[in-house]
Image (cartoon, helix red, strand yellow):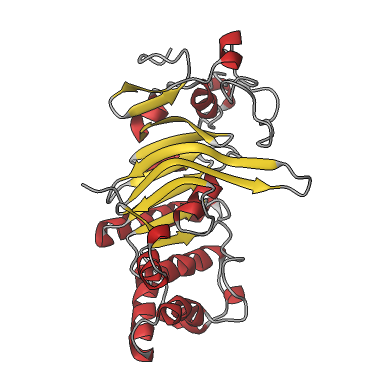
Amino acid sequence: MTPVLGVDDLRIRFPTKDGETVKAVDGVAFTVRPGETFGIIGESGSGKTTIGRALVGLVPPTTGTIRHDGQDLRTLGAREHRRRRRDYQIVFQDPNAALNPRMTILQSLLEPLEIVGEGDGRTRRDLAMEALERAGLASELALRYPHQLSGGQKQRANIARALTLRPRLIVCDEVVAALDVSIRGDILNLFARLQRELGLTYVFITHDISVVAHISDRVAVMYLGRYMELGPAEAVTEAPLHPYTQALLSAEPVPLPSHLREDRRIRLTGEIPSPIAPPSGCRFRTRCPRATPLCAEREPEWRELAPDHWVACHFAAPDGR
């Protein structure tokens, strides 16, 4: 089965005013299978959002390839590129910034349909109202402006706008991070329902391990522009192989009274190094509690230590020790 997305040796670099280069993404390869939810987690500055934007064509790769259904869109003519591009949409983190405050919700939903020239005015309105309903918003909200909606309603409107073009894949970039905790579950359940009903594929980007564990089939753990670990969600969250993944999991809050909690947190010292001049060898070595001189001398291989479970660490073992 052809992957919905195939990424090979993706590198994305940005020049700075000082003439240096930020290595935002530095050699990442993965596939996204039809109908799955592929999670990407990591700290701020790890490069996960840059990957998400590249997947939908908002950021061009510096080197490497991104194939949509086996096709590199950069090789297509303008018309065919536009036709294929509509299959890959993104929902951004901030529901306020993603909506034009001068446009009603209906106008925002109609805009992508007008850009691609979908049908006539009546067809577009029908598609927009159908998407609004699928996203769980009442029809009377269509004529309201963004400031008249709650944060959760705005994010549902953004989801509806992505649905108007009937995409095959949606990149979800921290889509619940700006929402109240009380409504995050509703939005995640909405994504799950849409996936069942429409056969959608997701790339779910987040820094919250509990979110990615709840919704993802596979999870990639990213640090300083590279993947540290990638595997089935249950394996990565229950039996992590990389010290960085283990540290992230140890920092997850435990819903128990303080006197019943065991302090198992792995405390990382220091900040993420600069992506302009990343450390030699293993990128994580400057903060890793298990680092040795070997970690500075040699870059760890990307190894499959269990079925479909990959890790980049010299000392990772199948039993997680």
* Residue that lies at the very extreme toward the top in this rendered image: 293
Position above or below: 260 against 29: above
Measured as percent of width and height from the top left, residue 311 is found at 42, 24
The answer to whether residue 292 shows anywhere in this view is no
Residue 296 picture location, percent across and down: 61, 16
Is any atom of residue 62 visible in this view?
yes
Direction left: furthest residue = 1
When the figure is inspected, residue 240 is found, relative to residue 12, above or below; the finding is above
Q: Residue at x 41, y 80 (%)?
A: 139
**Residue in view at x 51 percent, y 30 percent:** 254
**247 is higher (above) or lower (below) than 190:** above
**Split into 4 quadrants, where in the image is the C terminus?**
top left
> Which residue is nearer to you in this view: 108 or 262?
108
Instruction: Name the residue located 26 percent from the left edge and 56 percent from the top edge.
Output: 196
> Front-most of 230 and 240?
230
Location of residue 21 by image quarter? top right
Q: Report the side of 102 relative to 175 (left or right).
A: right
Residue at image x 31%, y 22%? 306
**Front in this rendered view, residue 221 or 155:** 221
Q: Where is residue 115 in the image (x, y as percent from the top left)?
A: 45, 79
Furthest toward the bottom, the residue is 121
Find residue 234 and report its image quarter: top left
Number of numbered labels in the structure image: 0
Q: Where is residue 264 in the image (x, y as percent from the top left)?
A: 54, 18
Apparent side of residue 193 relative to residue 44 in the rendered image (left or right):
left
